[in-house]
């Protein structure tokens, strides 16, 4: 593999080669550690799949909260881009306060860029109050807002005084970081500082109260997870942030355990909840049948309640009896096939379970914008050197809430539990991949094509930006971001749905009408020199 990899690197100019080599590793379990460079700038001119800080803040973390109105301060394109494309679903008992289908933007024009957009923003807030009457408004900044120096914080403060509701201002200008990841952090900080824990409930109204963090209800994933958890007897205090609500977030401090599905986007809140309220977090993965079962059993171990443990097993058995015969049918179609799994920040790892259960091998995987700990495990965090880009993001640290802090588990029990279940712990992608498989950080479009030609996978799981290139190369492509208009893919029902969808892809007669380019065309050959001419 190393030699083949070199054939790809050889096509790069020397400087680019040097940089990209640090972002790609071949899994080798004989080595105790394998460092990968991550969360650094994409080389200008390279076609990346990454998004921006605004996408991570407004699009990912804030957007799914249904009863807040999210105002995008900027030119219309940024707002339009984030208009329902992520498929974070939401239902509400109070349809008048479900704003999920709206896209609200200040639609900045040239004159606003020249003379400032603060007045226009204040006017949009007034209009939003008149039309929607929400309990909370968020303001998200796009690149030009920071460049011209609009003071969104001041506008938010004045609007709070005028309208008597919370108006949260997020300085998530696209350029604030090297990717979406910066935006996650910015959103986490402010939600923690200003919303979470401001509710007046002291304790949860039912037994086994939990928060589900890093679950955004894409294609209904969160609803499937909630279905299973409720069946077992858990009380879900809040989901962050899929189908999430302002009120639920405010009382999130009442949970006894925080589950973390997507660690990348929300580990900051998880850590802060532990510091502030003494609530531990458990890494879960509800993608894949075994992943779901393991997560449920780990939760039962944490709560250590006889009845709950029993009910967990009863639910697992009944769900399995129902889905296994269907799943087995699809397994026949998928078994023996190979896959690439390249997604944003955690699904590149999470979905590999599901591939393995279908008898498929993951040859290559990676993330667009993950950090080194997502590849190498949380133990490397202290060794990650901050750079100018990461220092750019305010590092908010929560303090102990003297009134509400309560250790949920004794230190001795915590130690014993930590030896058995991933409490406050997350093993990186590297641990779950086979020797010889390739791990790529911020894979670009050139590499996408080259790796396809090299390894010819049967399935390429990724996003919209490369989907059609892959498909035109004759490879079955599956969007793991938006789920190609399908879903859910989480939990027991999700595993079956996913198996059905990719089996359909494999069985489609379409492939007979496509000849991959390497089969009948001479490949364009050439080299690029340092000057790029
Ligand atoms: Fe977490 Fe996500 Fe992901 Fe993500 Fe995203 Fe997403 Fe993703 Mo697209 S929060 S890191 S910033 S699991 S939007 S729901 S699919 S890149 S792998
Ligand atoms: C984003 C959102 C995205 C994009 C999906 C894709 C999503 O990065 O802003 O590239 O296919 O999941 O919707 O990650």
Image (cartoon, grey):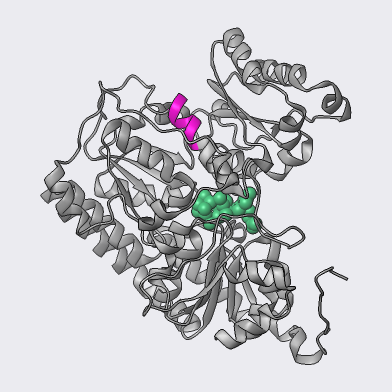
- In depth, the one of 123 and 19 nearer the eye is 19
Do we see residue 415 in this rendering? yes
Q: Give the x, y percent position of residue 17.
A: 67, 72
Viewed as shown, does residue 263 lie left or right of 176?
left
Say whether residue 214 is magenta.
no
Between 210 and 366, the one lying in front of the other is 366
Q: Position of residue 347 (x, y in %)?
A: 49, 60
Residue 89: x and y in percent read 54, 44
Is-magenta flag for residue 192?
A: yes
| Quadrant for the N terminus in the image | bottom right
Number of residue marks: 0
Q: Residue at x 49, y 80 (%)?
A: 334
Vertical order, 91 against 503 (above or below) = above
User: Which corner quadrant of the image does residue 375 belong to?
Assistant: bottom left
Residue 90 seen from this side: no
Q: Main secondary structure of the magenta part?
A: helix
User: On screen, 321 above or below 56?
Assistant: below
Q: Nearer the viewer, residue 410 or 293?
A: 410
**Which residues are the magenta region?**
188-195
| Residue 52 x %, y % | 65, 47
């Amino acid at each position: 593999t190393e030699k083949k990899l070199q054939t790809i690197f050889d096509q790069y100019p020397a400087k680019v080669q040097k940089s990209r080599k640090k972002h790609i590793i071949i899994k080798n379990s004989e080595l105790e550690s394998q460092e990968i460079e991550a969360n650094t700038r994409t080389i200008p001119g390279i076609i990346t799949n990454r998004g921006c800080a605004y996408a991570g803040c407004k699009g990912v973390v804030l957007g799914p909260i249904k009863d807040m109105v999210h105002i995008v301060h900027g030119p219309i394109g940024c707002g339009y881009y984030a208009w329902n494309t992520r498929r974070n679903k939401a239902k509400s008992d109070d349809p008048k306060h479900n704003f999920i289908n709206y896209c609200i933007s200040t639609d900045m024009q040239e004159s606003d860029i020249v003379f400032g957009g603060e007045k226009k923003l204040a006017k949009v807030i007034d209009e939003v109050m008149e039309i929607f009457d929400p309990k909370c408004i968020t303001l998200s900044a796009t690149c030009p807002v920071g460049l011209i120096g609009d003071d969104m914080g001041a506008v938010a403060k004045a609007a709070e005084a005028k309208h008597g509701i919370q108006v949260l201002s997020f300085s998530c200008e696209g350029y604030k970081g090297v990717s979406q990841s910066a935006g996650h952090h910015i959103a986490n900080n402010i939600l923690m500082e200003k919303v979470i824990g401001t509710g007046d409930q002291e304790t949860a109204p039912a037994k086994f109260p939990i928060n589900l963090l890093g679950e955004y209800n894409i294609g209904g994933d969160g609803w499937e997870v909630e279905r299973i958890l409720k069946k077992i007897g858990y009380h879900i205090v809040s989901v962050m942030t899929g189908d999430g609500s302002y009120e639920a977030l405010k009382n999130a401090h009442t949970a006894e355990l925080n589950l973390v599905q997507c660690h990348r986007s929300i580990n900051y809140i998880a850590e802060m909840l532990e510091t502030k309220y003494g609530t531990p977090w458990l890494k879960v993965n509800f993608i894949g049948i075994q992943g779901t079962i393991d997560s449920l059993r780990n939760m039962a171990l944490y709560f250590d309640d006889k009845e709950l443990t029993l009910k967990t097993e009863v639910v697992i058995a009944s769900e399995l009896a129902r889905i296994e015969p269907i799943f087995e049918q699809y397994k026949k179609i998928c078994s023996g096939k190979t896959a690439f799994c390249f997604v944003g920040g955690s699904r590149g790892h999470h979905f590999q379970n599901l591939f393995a259960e279908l008898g498929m091998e993951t040859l290559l995987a990676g993330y667009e914008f993950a950090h080194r700990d997502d590849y190498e495990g949380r133990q490397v965090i202290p060794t990650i050197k901050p750079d100018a880009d990461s220092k750019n993001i305010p590092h908010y640290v929560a303090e102990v809430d003297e009134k509400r802090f309560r250790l949920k588990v004794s230190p001795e029990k915590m130690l014993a539990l930590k030896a058995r279940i991933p409490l406050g712990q997350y093993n990186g992608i590297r641990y779950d991949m086979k020797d010889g498989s390739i791990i790529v950080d911020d894979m670009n479009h050139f590499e996408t094509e080259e790796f396809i030609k090299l390894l010819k996978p049967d399935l390429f799981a990724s996003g919209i930006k490369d989907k059609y290139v892959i498909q035109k190369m004759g490879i079955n492509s599956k969007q793991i971001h938006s789920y190609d208009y399908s879903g859910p893919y989480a939990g027991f029902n999700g595993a079956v749905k996913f198996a059905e969808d990719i089996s359909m892809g494999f069985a489609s007669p379409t492939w007979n009408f496509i000849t991959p380019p390497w089969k009948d065309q001479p490949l364009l050959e050439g080299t690029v020199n340092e000057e790029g001419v």
